[in-house]
Image: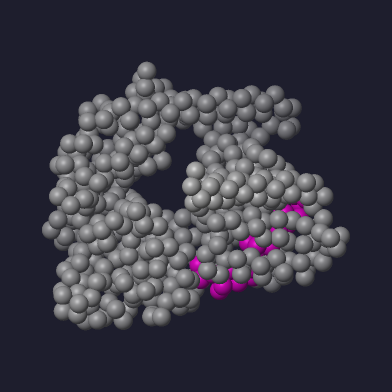
Amino acid sequence: MNNKTAWRTHLGLGLLVLVFLVSAWQALTRGGARANDGRTTIRVGHWLMHAGMREAFDEAAREYERLHPNVRVEQIAVPVRSWGAWVRTQLIGGTAPDITGQLGLNEEQLSRHFLPLDSLLDAPNAYNRDSPLAGVPWRETFNDGLSAMRAFNPNSGEITGVYLQLTSLRLFYNKSLLRRVTGSDRPPATYAELRALREQVDRYNARHGAMLEPLAGCGPYAQFLFQRLLPSQTQRLGIELSPSRNLHLGLAELAELMLEGKLDYRAPELRSSLELLRDVSVLMSPGFSQLQRDDALFAFLQEHAVGIVAGTWDYAVFVRDGKFETGVAPVPFPDHTDPRFGQHVLGPIAEAGGGPEGMMGVTNSSPHPEIAVDFLRFLTSHRMATRFTALSKRVSAIAEIPPPPDAPGLAPQLEGEVPGFAIDYQFFGASHAYTHFQRHLYSLLGPGGGVDAFLNDFERDLPAALRRDMAAHTGRARRDAQALDARIGIMLSLPPERMDMAEIERLFEASTLRQTAYLRHRDLGEP
């Protein structure tokens, strides 16, 4: 073993020992939950390390401590790359913070490790006195009435957390650089205008000896862009193929059509999606899929790219670190006049309120759940939500709070058409088909590649991957139905005065839907 290898080995062992010691210390100090000065300590664990967020949490903690001198609030911020492993380890070990973020957790984990909040949500939030939300039930102070949080537990229907903010995808652009390249700082309004930026940048580079790119890109953010843009090509088809005529084609229904030979990637809409995927990729530098978020943000902030398609959570970074004025615009979609990609579109896709961000709840292992719930109320009060928006420059999930005044374009676009369906099977089954899709992307996006080259490689083994995913999907549906039936049985055994018939009916409906999903697709799964 050479010195370099030995050094790496010892470093790895040292890190493992350090992690063990920290976890052991947390477990040993967890039970008392008392600060050295006798105050009760509650801990808040999250992954929200973007610009302004830790400062906002710190301000909220100090303000809560001022109102409650007997309480100490401790913030534990974990890098998002480590979050998944960290939070699962903490939950399983019973050492999770009193209030813990819920990013990446599934329904089983949420139900097992977090307190249901439903019974607490109909009372007003006491911290909203003297605000526009005074007297309003806590549930109704959120823009969507917490329906997004209920959606995380579709089987139980329980609400096991709240969330702080809403996020969307936006085109951020360097106004001065865009003006130098195009002669105007007006951002692209359609996909055709965005695509034209490639030729405009190439001409600018040739004239000035520069090496600009139209968009700074990386693997994760490119995936966000693809997921936002490509469903424009399947809008009409999704409505036509929707089995329940609800304007939506689910991934299981898409897999069913594929496995039964009723649809394939040679269909004009799906082929157009693949062509759009290849087309938009040329706006980013070669090798973008190997880059990470920090690489893309660095390229944009160093003015190596005119723009970047990123989450609204990054706006504060651009304002803080950019030496230029950052513009904000919706992600441009193909319109009806687009000669290549306009045939199948209905129009720009509504954002339906935006995606929930900052989801967190009170863990079952918290020694002081009443204080933890109270701090959640404080965090989501009108006053503190306003401060979070000011410090983080993000859109609040709380009603009556406008977006940051310097960036109204961050607010979700509520008007628009329904999305089509994605074509990569992300989040379906056990992700076999999604992994298969990603594995063969090189033949679509690489030099000399194209749609035909991709399909020749991809379609051959797709049915086997879909059958494995369908088996995972139906197995989960069956387990869900069994769990719901068990819960219904328990509720039916209660005395009549304690029965909640509305909840029992809801559970019956949920069980029927899951059983139907199992029976409908079980024969398409792996033998």
Residue drawn at (54%, 51%) of the image: 7
Q: In this figure, what is the number of numbered marks?
A: 0
Q: Residue furthest top?
A: 527
Instruction: Point out the image quarter for the C terminus.
Output: top left
Q: For residue 452, what is the image quadrant?
A: top left
Residue drawn at (65%, 39%) of the image: 92
Q: Residue furthest front?
A: 2
Q: Residue furthest left?
A: 339
Position above or below: 39 against 524:
below
Closer to the camera, 520 or 315? 315
Q: Is residue 384 magenta?
A: yes
Position above or below: 256 against 370:
above
* Left or right: residue 492 compared with residue 290: right
Residue drawn at (62%, 28%) of the image: 487
Residue 161 in sight: no
Highlighted range, magenta? 367-394
Q: Residue 25's x, y, as percent?
A: 74, 49
Closer to the camera, 1 or 172? 1
Residue drawn at (53%, 47%) of the image: 6
**Mostly what secondary structure, the magenta segment?**
helix
Q: Residue 54's x, y, as percent?
A: 60, 66
Residue 39 in sight: yes
Q: Is residue 519 magenta?
A: no
Q: For residue 196, what is the image quadrant?
A: bottom left
Q: Which of the colour schemes (rainbow, by chain, secondary structure, one colour) is used?
A: one colour
* Left or right: residue 378 compared with residue 292: right
Q: For residue 329, what is the image quadrant?
A: bottom left
Q: Residue 168's x, y, as percent?
A: 42, 60
Position above or below: 120 against 526:
below
